[in-house]
Amino acid sequence: MTFTVLTLFPGLFAGFLGESILARSIERGLLSVRLVDIRDFAADRHRVCDDAPYGGGPGMVMKPEPLAAALEAAGTAGRRVVYLTPSGRRYDQRMAAELAAGTDVVLVCGRYEGVDQRVIDAFVTDEVSVGDYVLSGGEVAAMAVIDSVARLVKGVIAEDSLAEESFSAGLLEYPHYTRPEVFRGMRVPEVLLSGHHENIRRWRLAASVRKTLANRPDLADAAALSPEARELARRIAEDTEGVGHGCDTGDRG
């Protein structure tokens, strides 16, 4: 999987790409990340890449010439070109999987008030937002896309680690516990100590449904839930007892 990132600040990616899973995957040849400095394509000696907006208004806009030249040098024919912007389509796990199914993606990091619309019209295939908030630039958003897509690339992470993650079955992931058995008076739920795999599976499913209904009910409404999860959601929605603080999720199976 190849990521080509167009940015005014390539140095921001050094630590992100140089540690942990991404660094190991790049070293193993599973991933490739090419950083393109848009300033290298500016026409003047000061490497200016922004200008005032037509029509007036605050801030500056990224000029079309350097960015278009950078995109042409990177090569965009037949490739997904994703522009990271607060006004784009909301990014989610489904889109991450969609991008991971390909072989490469071009990520355009905006700055200032954004980029000249003519570049978007000429080159961009997807305008993407990582959330309903505004960042100083597209670099952090690009990192989120790279990380979320990379971990779905075969060989980067063990497939069994992905099977029960949040969003994998339309639900948020269940709570996790590790040693010690008692921490500051809070105990690990007994079912997780039982060794009874079916009861543990049922507890985790119930916990996932409860967490989804509490934190992201929109997912439960839209998800293609299994009949078992759907029935649990119905029962839990009718139940007057809450989840508490995560140490007891109710279903002891």
Image: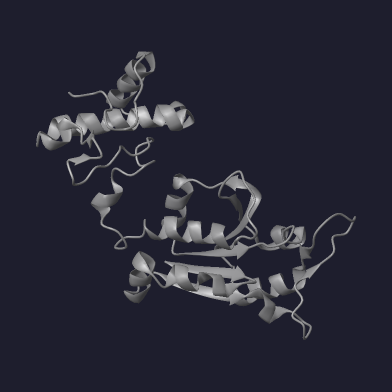
Question: Please, which residue is most extreme toward the front here?
Answer: 184
Relative to 56, is 224 on the left or the right? left
In which quadrant will I find the N terminus? bottom left
Front residue (pair 76, 119): 119
Residue 114 place in picture, x, y as percent: 72, 58
Front residue (pair 221, 132): 132
Residue 243 place in picture, x, y as percent: 34, 25
Residue 191 place in picture, x, y as percent: 16, 31
Report the coloring of the rendering: one colour
Task: Name above or below for residue 88 compared with residue 145.
Answer: above
Relative to 253, is 95 on the left or the right? right
Residue shown at 47% from the left, 55% from the top: 99
- Name the quadrant containing residue 78: bottom right
Task: Name above or below for residue 29 compared with residue 213.
Answer: below
Q: Is residue 82 visible?
A: yes
- Name the quadrant containing residue 57: bottom right
- Name the quadrant containing residue 120: bottom right
Residue 131 place in picture, x, y as percent: 57, 46
Question: Please, which residue is most extreme toward the bottom here?
Answer: 45
Residue shown at 22% from the left, 30% from the top: 203
Residue shown at 45% from the left, 26% from the top: 221
Front residue (pair 64, 173): 173
Front residue (pair 127, 147): 147
